Image (cartoon, rainbow, N blue to C red):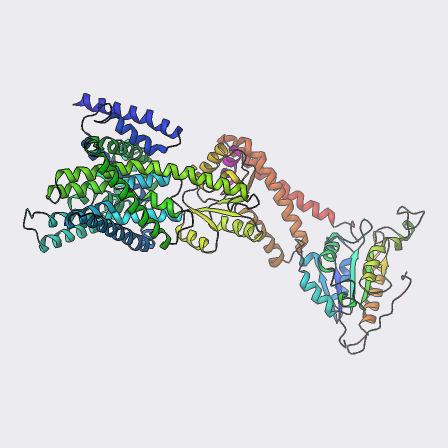
Amino acid sequence: MTVPNILILYAHPAPQRSPLSRRLAEAARATPGVTLQDLYELYPDFDIDAQHERSLLQAAHLVVFLHPIRWYGMPSMLKEWMEAVLRPGWAYGKTESERALRGKGCWLVTSTGSGPEAWGPDGIHGHPFDAFLLPIRQTALLCGMDWLAPLVMHGTLDAGEAAIDAHVHEFGRRLAGYTGGAAGTPPRIAPEASHGA
Amino acid sequence: MEHSLLLNACVYLAAAVIAVPLSKRLGMGAVLGYLVAGILIGPYGFKFIGEAEDALHFAEFGVVLLLFLIGLELEPSRLWSLRRPIFGWGGAQVGLVAAALFGAALLAGISWKLALIAGLGLSLSSTAIALASLEERNLMPTPAGQASFSILLFQDIAAIPMIAIVPLLGIPESAGGGGNAWIAVIKVVVVLAGLIIGGRFLIRPLLRFIAKTDAREIFTAFALLLVIAISLLMQSVGVSMALGAFMAGVLLADSEYRHALETDLEPFKGLLLGLFFIAVGMSVDFGVFLARPGIVLALVAAFLLIKTGILYLLSRAFGMARGQHLQFALILSQGGEFAFVVFGAAATARVFSDEVASTLVVVVALSMVVTPLVLMAYDRLSARRQGAQRSDQADEIEPNEDHVIIAGFGRFGQIVGRFLNASGVNLTVLDHDPDQVDVLRRFGFKVFYGDATRADLMRAAGAARARALVVAIDDIEDSLALVESVRRDYPDLPIFARARNVTHYYQLMDRGVTLIERETFEAAVKLGRSVLTAGLGQSAYRTRQAADKFRKYNTQNVLAVYPYYKDRDTYASMAKRARDELETMIARDRKAVDEETGQDWD
């Protein structure tokens, strides 16, 4: 695994209506060593080619989920992707050989419309944002993956151009970090206990 | 004269009207009903009709019409594909049965000439009785039906040389010779060539011309004239009328007036065939029978046993389905119409005495009466046996149960059918393209060849036990006719229909069909999606959503216009309104998309 191989699973049902996700996807595409799967573009009828997706996963050392949060979770396409691709006996199972994703990194890059104040016991969502990431985080752990600190942007609806620029820049910086900066250097993947701000 | 003609017609029709429904009611079938009616009104019954022979000659035209109509359903290419069963199986049947009967007669101490002619004549079966029995039981599309048909066709051909050689065995009346035979062959070839050329370049334009005059009865008259003229022409060169009519039918099988000819001639065929059976019933000479009942009965029994036995053995060699062997043998077991002609010729040539000839004619006539009876007994027995088997093995599912019927297996039905087949659905396919049918059979599909709009074919295909019917026929009228008959006969069978266009869609709705797909709609929407994505670079998912929206709107629109489609003016204005609505809808779609560019997604 000398050549860095990052697989980004990008799921956005209406990129033309999004100020942020589109720019993140563009930035990812421009990064060497990154394979970006635009799931809504590839499978508009939800007929996911599970076998092909599994072979991409197998070749990657870092798996990135890039999508907005809606109704406290991932877009329906990504859920369908998980059901079709993460087959029992391949992604998880009793023996180690049945965990094809074991040891790979898992990085969530997501965003929400409401600002940070909406998350928490006193906010309109009633729980801290972390609480809503439990299913995807546990999915990664069940598959034996290393859960990296997610990159989250809150309040995108009110965010100005500058805030978005800054976020995209931060995304690019961390992505480049995971590629090891240059080809040939093994990427550093260190699981983090707490999520980034 | 006219009076007696009407009176005779009255007697025949009354006998048929009384006897046939009664016979069917008793489960004995129409053929037996006609035969019994004939016996009852004939010289040995109530003596309503004096001489049977005239009626028999006249009614033979029913057999001629029957063969013409069969020819109409057989295109030359299909007939060519049947050449092996016709000449192979037909030849084997006539040869072996004649040989067996000849041998048996020799053993019984009968002179070889007599034995030979009797054997040859009795090897022929009755086209009318066999085909009517097959049709009554919907067996025509089965292997037994096809084999029977091929053999009967060969017999019609074989009868010609038989009738020709009979005089050679007798006292030579005129110095015939090889030269004569050659001339006869040349005559037949010339007439056939004339028929093929005339059929294409004369009869078809003539049919077109007459059809254009729009006088329906003249078209019917021409159809009858055509068959009669061709039959007489064929007879004049020594080919049997039935065979001639059959060839004429084949020549017209791919003409556009095939269906019109069929519908016009069908009632004549039915009535004349009925008359033919009545005449056979009348011609049973009970005088000869009563003079020596023991000998006649023994002859009938021996004849039927030998012929059925040989046919049964042959059926095993023909690779027929198990369980059809005996039925096939019984259906062809009787003596035929041609036997009358052969024995008549033999009596004229003095090979036979009149006594022998009339005895043999009675044997043949009785065998014709016995066939429907034996078949009825066979049906009863096999039904009982199957019933017993079914209760023994309740788990075993019948092959034709729980299935989906697909009517029409062209470019549309094929996709539906192959998809259902791939999903493990039990299929029954109805199609009228013989090549298609052959290929599908080879792949183990259950295929019925024929016109799906025929009620008997639907019954044979097991419509009563079907889960669903897919109507994928090309022809709109056929599709509607099928839907109508199925709605009437099988009201509980769900219908899934392919609509050729919106009007067809509405016509299907008129007939109570609710699950309809316009055949090109989905493909067109799909192609539109490809244009937008692969061609114009629009995002795939967004395009899919637009297509979904378009489909929904379009379907609503089609349904909204439905109440008005019969009223042409309203329909036109509604259609116009629908177009306007589509325009506003498209504009609204665009606006909606524009509005959505706002920030409702991260």
Name the residue at 73% across, 46% down: B595
Count of numbered marks? 0
Q: Quadrant of residue B133?
A: top left
Residue A8 location, x and y as percent?
75, 64
Q: Is residue B468 visible?
A: no
Q: Nearer the viewer, residue B529 or B261?
A: B261
Image check: A66 left or right of B498?
Answer: right
Q: Nearer the viewer, residue B257 or B35?
A: B35
Q: Is residue B395 visible?
A: yes
B504 magenta-colored = yes
Work out which residue is located at the far right of the displayed protein and give it: A122
| Placement of the C terminus of chain B among the 4 image quadrants | bottom right
Name the residue at 38% across, 30% down: B24
Classify B435 as above or below B577: below
Image check: B15 left or right of A93?
Answer: left
Work out which residue is located at the far bottom of the displayed protein and give it: A184
Residue B226 location, x and y as percent?
23, 39
Classify B549 as above or below B77: above
Q: What is the magenta range? A: B497-513
Image check: B108 left or right of B15?
Answer: left
Image check: B400 left or right of B353?
Answer: right
Q: Nearer the viewer, residue B302 or B341?
A: B302
Residue B241 location, x and y as percent?
21, 42
| Placement of the N terminus of chain B among the 4 image quadrants | top left
B462 magenta-colored = no
Q: Nearer the viewer, residue B75 or B158?
A: B158
Residue B347 location, x and y as percent?
13, 41
